[in-house]
Amino acid sequence: MNNVEPQASDRTENAARLRQQIIAAAGEHFSRYGYDKTTVSDLAREIGFSKAYIYKFFGSKQAIGEAICWNFLSIILDAVDSALADAPSATEKMRRLIGVVANQGVRLFFEDRKLYEIASYSSAEKWQTTVRYGDGLRARLEAILQEGRATGEFERKTPKDEVCRAILRVVQPFTNPLILQYGLDDAAEAATEVAALILRSLAP
């Protein structure tokens, strides 16, 4: 019995390592050639695995793309969490959330245009990673609204769900890569102005 568990653990760790190896290689390939121009056969040749072997870990090219996409979308959420951790108030948390999302999106665009294109493709096709990212932003926004109402920083008359939906629509120029690419030059300034407008609307 003692021999079985380590073997199962080794297999799990090996599968996770191989999965990450495929994701990393695919990310590099997509960065050079773009998502649309890459096939699973291309990735198989690049990595040195058979196409059938890659399909053991990912059911499709989209599944690989989603894994890569989530890697950098989760980085944005982590950056938001880090920024919110020491914010002294709900008001400041709102400012930081909007600012960090905008700045991280711009950073990704300039650091790796091809991977940014995957994020844009994911948004256009409504991949599950984009839905998951949106849910993550919504959860953080709801927590900020709840805190602001509890401390008296924000008004309480408007239903919270309605407020949350409205804010998410207003910040789409920063959260949606399809829109963000057209406002890169002044994204930071625009995020500051939009945050100020939202906070004025939330004042009790």
Image (tube, grey):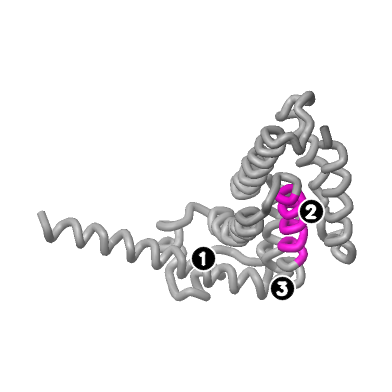
Q: Can you identify the residue that label 1 sits on? A: 23
Q: Nearer the viewer, mark 2 or mark 1?
A: 2
- Quarter of the image for residue 33 reads bottom right
Q: Which residue is mark 3?
A: 111
Q: Neighbour class for label 2 at 10 Å: few (<14), some, many (≥20)? A: many
* Residue farthest toward the left in the current orientation of the protein: 1
Question: Separation of disc 1 and disc 3 at Cα?
Answer: 18 Å
Q: Which residues are magenta?
A: 92-106
Q: Give the residue at mark 2.
A: 174
For residue 170, which quarter of the picture?
top right
Residue 98 lies in magenta, yes or no? yes
In the drawing, does residue 185 fall left or right of residue 25? right
**Residue 85 lies in the magenta-colored region:** no
Whole-number angstrom distance, CA of label 3 to CA of label 2 = 17 Å
User: Disc 3 or disc 2, which is closer to the eye?
Assistant: 2
Task: Name which residue type carries label 2.
Answer: Phe
Q: Amino acid at mark 1?
A: Ile
Q: Residues within 10 Å of mark 1 (few under 14, many from 20)?
A: many
Lower sequence index among marks 3 and 2 = 3
With respect to residue 178, does 157 lie above or below?
above
Foreground of the two, 13 or 90: 90
Q: Are marks 2 and 1 in contact (CB under 8 Å)?
A: no
Where does residue 49 sit, x and y in percent of width and height?
43, 71
